[in-house]
């Protein structure tokens, strides 16, 4: 699959207004306030171009590193980007910006659902929540997450934007796409009708499990100016250190994500083969009957409307996906039987992570395991999973034969 994510843009795309930084590796800017120039006509904060600032006033408005990161993020997403202190801070800012009369959302990250509830409480208004398959009307915001957390399945952005008479744009509504699971070069939501693209920068943009951040990307400078005006007084700016870590991480995005995508796809397809192996048989020594189902965009068939996920995931498949084990006790213990997978929540880092999703999402099926694939070698990760699944099968047999609870064995 072709990729338009270019390392040149990631490394040099922060040369603002043609200037070339003196430093090869940028310094961390820690100042909260900046010296004012001597009077020379009109020179107030309102005269400063916040997208291409010739000087900084106060770090709640702009500072050098976050501005540079925003230029790169805008360039690689074909829009205008703004950074926030966390993914959920960005989600809240999107709600403030769109001021929806109704919100269409189904499934996906439980944190965004909770942020919507906080927004409704702050507004003191009854803002109806509808399903993304319901009929839209003017004033609606369709909040579409794709690929979907935690399972990693793709949804058809174009269908909800434009394809039918009930699509959100046909009635004057707006479409926000949470593309956290599908960063560049995997997918480009503006190509399919998104009005705003949302990312938790904590995940693939950060890529090293060491920063919190959020990003909103919009299609026009007018929308960007409105967002930054809101952000100044919401106060949800990215911290100086986090902005520096983000800028550092963006330099290698084109190297990390395709590697993670390729490895995750191979693992998902192998685990799917294990899931399809009947009980009493085995595949590469792994007995069938442990895994019930594996979800991943690469495993999705063309749907009844003709949506083929590969047309949207043009740069590769998502590197985070899920599987359903048959026994919740197995799901509870599997993360702690692995050598290279770290038992932890979050995703998108260079290290592979695994979790029983119930540990961070109280509404999750207790049998569900989410896997975030890092940049380790495929064979090492596969062998790690093989060893753990074989051990689970042995424990299962021991438990059955001896009538011993699984929890007593581990």
Image (spheres, rainbow, N blue to C red):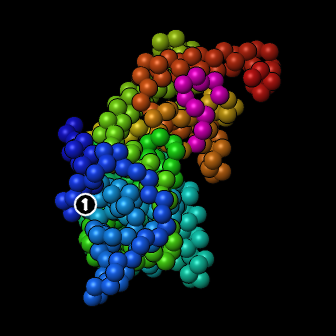
* Residue occupying the far front of the picture: 38
Residue 135, by quadrant, is bottom left
The answer to whether residue 195 of the structure is visible from this angle is no
Kind of element beneath mark 1: helix
Residue at position x 58%, y 63% in the image = 114
Using the image as rendered, state which of residue 228 and residue 154 is in the foreground: 228
Residue 252: x and y in percent read 34, 39
**The C terminus is located in which quarter?**
top right
Q: Which residue is mark 1?
A: 16
Using the image as rendered, state which of residue 281 and residue 40 is in the foreground: 40
Identify whether 379 is placed above or below 20. Answer: above
Span colored in magenta = 336-345
Majority SS type along the magenta span: loop
Residue 298: x and y in percent read 35, 36
The answer to whether residue 162 of the structure is visible from this angle is yes
Residue 10: x and y in percent read 28, 47
């Amino acid at each position: 699959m072709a990729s338009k994510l270019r390392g040149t843009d990631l490394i040099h795309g922060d040369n603002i207004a043609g200037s070339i930084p003196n430093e090869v590796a940028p310094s961390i800017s820690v100042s909260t306030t900046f010296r004012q120039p001597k009077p020379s006509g009109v020179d107030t904060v309102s005269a400063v171009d916040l997208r291409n600032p010739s000087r900084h006033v106060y770090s709640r408005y702009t500072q050098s590193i976050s501005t540079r990161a925003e230029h790169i993020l805008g360039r690689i997403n074909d829009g205008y980007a703004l950074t926030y202190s966390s993914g959920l801070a960005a989600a809240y800012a999107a709600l403030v910006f769109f001021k929806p009369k109704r919100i269409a959302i189904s499934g996906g990250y439980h944190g965004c659902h909770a942020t919507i509830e906080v927004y409704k409480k702050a507004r003191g208004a009854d803002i109806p929540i509808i399903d993304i398959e319901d009929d839209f009307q003017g004033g609606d915001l369709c909040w579409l997450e794709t690929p979907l957390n935690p399972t990693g399945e793709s949804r058809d952005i174009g269908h909800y934007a434009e394809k039918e008479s009930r699509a959100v744009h046909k009635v004057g509504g707006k479409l926000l796409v949470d593309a956290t699971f599908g960063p560049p070069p995997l997918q480009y939501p503006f190509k399919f009708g998104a009005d705003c693209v949302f990312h938790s920068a904590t995940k693939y943009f950060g890529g090293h499990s060491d920063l919190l951040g959020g990003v909103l990307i919009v299609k026009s400078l007018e929308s960007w100016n409105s967002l930054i005006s809101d952000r100044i007084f919401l106060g949800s700016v990215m911290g100086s250190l986090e902005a520096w870590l983000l800028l550092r991480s963006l330099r290698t995005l084109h190297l990390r994500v395709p590697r993670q995508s390729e490895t995750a796809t191979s693992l998902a397809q192998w685990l799917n083969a294990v899931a399809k192996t009947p009980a009493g048989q085995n595949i590469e020594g792994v007995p069938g009957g442990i895994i019930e189902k594996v979800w991943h965009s690469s495993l999705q068939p063309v749907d009844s409307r003709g949506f083929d996920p590969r047309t949207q995931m043009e740069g590769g498949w998502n590197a985070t996906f899920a599987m359903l084990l048959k026994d919740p006790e197995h799901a509870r213990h599997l993360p702690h039987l692995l050598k290279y997978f770290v038992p932890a929540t979050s995703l998108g880092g260079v290290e592979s992570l695994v979790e029983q999703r119930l540990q961070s999402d109280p509404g999750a099926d207790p049998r569900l395991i989410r896997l975030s694939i890092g940049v380790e070698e495929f064979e090492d990760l596969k062998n790690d999973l093989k060893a753990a699944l074989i051990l689970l099968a042995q424990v299962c047999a021991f438990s059955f034969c001896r009538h011993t609870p699984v929890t007593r064995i581990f």
